[in-house]
Image (tube, grey):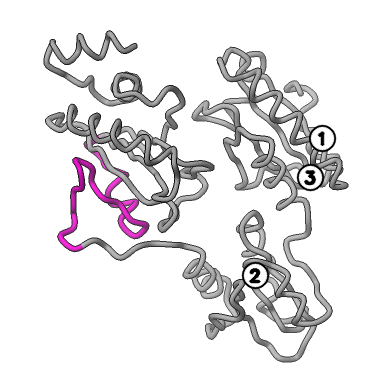
Amino acid sequence: LTRDGFDSFVTKNDRVLVDFYDRESTEWTKDKNELESAVRQVRNYGCKVPVAKVDSKVEGELAKKFVPRGNFPQLLWFTHGQPTKYHRTLRTAKSISDFVMALDREPVTAIKNAEEVKTFNRAILAELRKDSPLYSALEVVAQKHMDVLAVTWLDSPNNKISYYTEEGPGSVFTGGPTLKEFDAWVNSFMFKTEPIPEGHPLYDEGSLVVVGTTFEELLLRPDRDVMLLVYAPWCGFSKKFFSVWEAFAKIVSDQAHLIVAKMDGDRNSSPLPEDFSWPAYPTVLHVKAGERWPTVFHGNRTVANLVKFANEHGSQQIKLDPSVSSELEAEL
């Protein structure tokens, strides 16, 4: 797509997936092949959503408008000509196809009986009339969680909304008929967090321990950069990376401008999913002092590359002993 034809294309289609990419990236050919494979997969599933591309180098103004931080490739989902909150940096055919299939549907799914809700891993069952004040709130909230939550509706006078998991019914909404109360109720079980660790702020192997409820407090600093490792304890790649991460934390431990942190991404979720997300483990994020969005590390997971990455995106340069710097330079 070009600037001249972009608006008309996304407007004439109810739903559109747009890939903003950087042709000069070393991963561009691989990313392109994965996207094309994903498109073939969703077509086989019967999905007809148009998929378009924008070359960020050719259409710089357009790319900056929708991907202001320049973190390419970036997939954006448009509905009725408008960008939604669903924007992801996905790099495998499966993750892209899963993303598309999750969004290529109506936000609220009408069902004929309560048993149908059991076909979903995680869902809300709303048993109420369509003219209920809560139905409007249901539609708004459903739009926010389409890629992770099914919202189902059963035409009924029960006026009851329940949360279901694979284990069965759970929480029941007891608030008033307002969007604010209903949204807060949904967020209460969509957001995962471990308890705040005893002795908070707590360091483990040189890394500040972050959980969901301390995420914003510890990462969004006005005066210090933060490098965060998001891992899963069961992930083999995470386990292999731990020794490298701990060595990196040790080397930069005396850098006053930089905090090294880690979080179990399997037990904690992002309170800011529009800006902070991790499609795979391990993921390393850098947040510059005073900013509210991260830069994602891509590259060989070595101490030298982590230091180089921190220097490229940090508010200050890391100052190391000359002998250490020489060793790291030799690794690059």
Q: Which residue is mark 2?
A: 123
Of residues 263 and 173, the one nearer the viewer is: 263
Name the residue rendered at 77%, 75% in the picture.
116
Which of the numbered marks, if any, corresponds to residue 15? Answer: 3
- As shown in the figure, which amino acid type bears the numbered disc 3? Arg
Give the magenta-colored segment's residue range. Answer: 198-224
Residue 305's quadrant in the figure? top left
Nearer the viewer's eye, disc 2 or disc 1? 1
Circle 3 packing at 10 Å, graded few (<14), some (14-19), many (20+), is many
Above or below: residue 274 compared with residue 250:
below
Where does residue 220 sit, x and y in percent of width and height? 31, 44
Where does residue 250 sit, x and y in percent of width and height? 17, 32
- As shown in the figure, which amino acid type bears the numbered disc 1? Arg
Left or right of 211 in this view: 278? right
Asked whether residue 289 appears in the rendered view, the answer is no
Left or right of 121 in this view: 251? left
SS at circle 1: helix
**Magenta includes 218?**
yes
Above or below: residue 100 compared with residue 330:
below
Question: Cβ–Cβ below 8 Å for labels 3 and 1?
Answer: no
Q: Which residue is mark 1?
A: 40
Quadrant where the image shows the N terminus? top right
Reading the chain from its start, which is encountered first: label 2 or label 3? 3
Where does residue 48 sit, x and y in percent of width and height? 86, 43
